[in-house]
Image: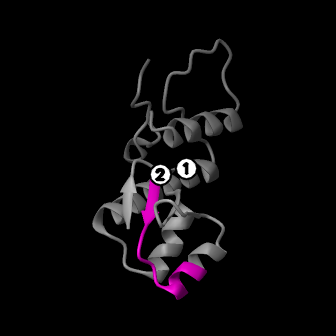
Amino acid sequence: MALQGNTLRIKDADNVQFTVIKSWNKMRWVKKLQELQGTADLELLDRLAGLVRLPPDVDRRRQELRTVQDAVDRQRVADHPAPLYDFPVKMPLYEHQVRGANMALITFGWVPPENQTNDRSVRA
């Protein structure tokens, strides 16, 4: 199992593992390379972690994705979210707009998930 960028590659899976992984429809078989390939998203990595022990770099990627998802979930349920950035708008944003903008900043990596507190830590 190897992680190249955002692509997860699996070689030498036994028949049972291959069948289970293939049934998820998250990876495709590349006949030329004799391996499974797929996007290393949180759902796939969580499922693989339940099936086999992940290599350290793949597990590290899984933890990073989990941290981002947890930060987004905290923003989603925040009662009165504070903007994580001074957005260049003239009118004040509604709470759902602040929430959505904050989740986008965290998801795209423009604000680290650890810094998403309720203070205005990132300035334009």
The stretch in magenta equals: 7-19
Which of the 4 image quadrants contains residue 110? top left
Which label is found at residue 68?
2
Residue 61 lies, in percent from the top left, at 38, 57
Q: Which one is in front, 50 or 19?
A: 19
Counting from the top left corner in percent of width and height, residue 85 is at 49, 27
Label 2: element kind: helix
Residue shown at the point (61%, 73%) measured from the top left: 22
Q: How many marks?
A: 2
- Eyeballing the image, is 94 above or below 60? above
Q: What amino acid is labelled 2 in the image?
A: Val
Which disc is residue 103 wearing? none
**In this view of the protein, can residue 69 be seen by the observer?**
yes
- At label 1, counting other C-alpha atoms closer than 10 Å, the crowd grade (few under 14, some 14-19, many 20 or more) is many
Q: Quadrant of the N terminus?
A: bottom left
Q: Residue at x 67, y 26 (%)?
A: 93
In the displayed structure, would residue 14 be above or below residue 25? below
**Residue pictured at 43% horizontal, 36% vertical:** 111
Q: Marks 1 and 2: in contact by CB < 8 Å?
A: yes
Foreground pick, 63 / 54: 54
Inspect this view and state whether residue 41 appears. Answer: no
Check the image and name the residue furthest to the front: 32
The reply to whether the magenta stretch includes residue 16 is yes
* Extreme-left residue of the structure: 56
* Image quadrant assignment for residue 58: bottom left
**What is the C-alpha distance between the residues marked 2 and 1?**
6 Å
The stretch drawn in magenta includes residue 10:
yes
- Where does the C terminus fall, quadrant-wise? top left
Percent position (x, y) of residue 62? 42, 62
Residue that numbered label 1 is attached to: 72
